[in-house]
Image (cartoon, coloured by chain):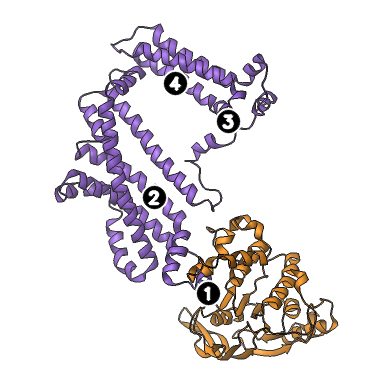
Chain colours: A orange, B purple
Amino acid sequence: MVALAVAGPITYPAVGASLDVEHVSHAFDIDGSVLPVLDDVNFSAKPGEFVALLGPSGCGKSTLLRLVAGLEPPRSGVLREDGDPVTGPFPSRVVVFQDPTLFPWRTVWKNVALGLEAQGILKTQRQRVDDAIDLVGLSQFRNAYPHQLSGGMAQRVALARALVNDPRILILDEPLGKLDSLTRITMQAELVALWQRKGFTTLLVTHDVEEALFLANRVIVFSDRPARIKADIAVDRPYPRHRGDPRLAELRRNILGLLGLDATW
Amino acid sequence: MSTYSASKAVAIPQSVEEGAAFAGRPLSLPASFLANGAAVFASVAWIGFGLSCLWWVDLADWPRTHALAIAAFVIAGGILVATLSAPWLGRFGPALQQRAPWLLALGLFLTVWEVATAKLAWLPLPFFPPPQAIIEVYTDDLPKLLDSVFASIKLQLGGYAIGAAVGFLTGVSIGWSRGVGYWVHPVLRFIGPLPATAWLPFAFFTFPSSWSASTFLIALATGFPVTVLTWSGVASVNNAYYDVARTLGAKPWFLVLKVAIPAALPHVFVGLFMGLGSSFAVLVVAEMIGVKAGLGWYLQWAQGWAAYSNMYAALIVMSLLCSGAITLLFRTRDRLLVWQKGVVKW
């Protein structure tokens, strides 16, 4: 799969949808008091763009993803997919969570089939499940149960479960956060390859600056809670990228500065 | 429950000889004799049991004493032959070797029982009948015993199925819908903890027949634990599962049938197990008091006529049935919950 990564200018196939986040604010009620988590967040992602959302842990990035997925409505503001307001969850916007959250009572195949089954189209489209499992390289494990898989394999299954729906916007909530560093590096390259091949718009929440710079076209840096956009940085480097790239190192220094961590550099 | 797990555990060879026997390599006769010490002693114990039947004269008139002795000798011979030919018996060989200590203990127990009752009357007759008296019940009173068995199974199955189904549906509804929970929860709290047998007087004059009354009571005893555990199972489903299913396009019905219920199944089976236990108790009481059939009634009848051997015979059958029912439930669970790791063995 790594070999699929294509060098050269970035092109955006027509699969991806545009995403507009317009003046979105959100808050939680905790024991009667209001805890603001998002403060007037504004940004857009072009169709097929890979946008990383970076910020200190607990700043509200994951909440923003839940709003994009339609799992919760924002307190104020609008989110739009291709111009249409997001009103609830829809399989064109699929989330891969930090935990694989595979259903332990289903085999790999049945887990990946979940979306098609929920939409009532599994019977005619079984091939898509096989294809998605092949895509993440787990065809030998299609009958395994989640407890038989390693962390990286489980997260690959979660990715296949999302991709089988041919999402227009793929929402990644620190999907590599709990993996060991070697698996993580492998899967970062795989993610880039999948994204380039499929052309969906990708929204990645992470607090790993290197990961954001290695993967994304743009990195949006958030402040501490309530999350506000601090900077919107274009990563103007072609794929496949190299971790030692001096331009990435420079961007990394800038971003760590924005997060108040430049002293550690 | 865990005490039973030993019988399922894989036996570990204790010595080089045993290890060789496990590998299925035929040993010379004396070596094989040594390796199968427990089985040989088991055979000796059963011969002892047979001899104990014949050595003394019975203190009372029991026609099956000789037949029992012959049966004991046949079993002893069977153990010995099966042990010596274990390498050619496939899976049966190790299974026999693993159970040999139990066969030995059983042979010793039967010998002591025989001597303590029929021969020397250390235990007072007729309250403690010898083994041959119980065998006599199985041969001579078989039709009545079988009728009772079928009556009990019929009553238990009907009541348990109704109770389990109603309990499951109620549990899922309370766990899923706040509205249903609001109305059903207080009723459940008020009625549930009441022992089902407390409803006996009410049930027997309200229901048209004692059979339907007993079915109601068994269903009640089953329903409460099934409801509570199904409910707790549904309530404790990880919210992330619902989030995942919803983003993949799941409708509420899909969330109930394909997420909440499968995730709650391990709890449901605990409820079914507990319900089975309490429903057995209600079954026996209902049969003793109201229904004129079934093993509970047979027990009552036997006790009334001072037919103590019949009572023990019925107790043994009842224990086999209850244990069999639990085995069946656990098999079903193991089949449905293969995805779970480390479940309790029965």
Mark pair 3, 1: CA separation = 50 Å
Q: Which amino acid lies under the numbered mark 4 shown in the image of this protein?
A: Phe
For image coordinates 26% across by 32% down, the residue present is: B147
In front of the other: label 4 or label 1?
A: 1
Can you tell which mark lies on residue B247? 1
Q: Which amino acid lies under the numbered mark 1 shown in the image of this protein?
A: Thr
Locate residue A38, reporting x and y percent: 57, 86
Locate residue B110, reporting x and y percent: 42, 19
Q: Is residue A265 left or right of residue B238?
A: right
Q: Which residue is mark 2?
A: B272
How busy is the neighbourhood of tag 2: few (under 14 within 10 Å), some, or many (20 plus)? many
For image coordinates 73% across by 87% down, the residue present is: A258
**Disc 1 is attached to a residue of which chain?**
B
Mark pair 4, 1: CA separation = 64 Å
Q: Which residue is mark 4?
A: B109
Label whose residue precedes the other's in the sequence (3 or 1): 3
Q: Which amino acid lies under the numbered mark 3 shown in the image of this protein?
A: Arg
Q: Which residue is mark 3?
A: B91
Locate residue A152, reporting x and y percent: 68, 63
Contact between labelled residues 1 and 4, with CB atoms less than 8 Å apart: no
In front of the other: label 2 or label 1?
A: 1
Can you tell which mark lies on residue B214? none
**Disc 4 is attached to a residue of which chain?**
B
Name the secondary structure under disc 1.
Answer: helix
For image coordinates 30% across by 13% down, the residue present is: B62
Q: Which amino acid lies under the numbered mark 2 shown in the image of this protein?
A: Leu
Same subunit, labels 4 and 1: the answer reads yes
**Disc 2 is attached to a residue of which chain?**
B
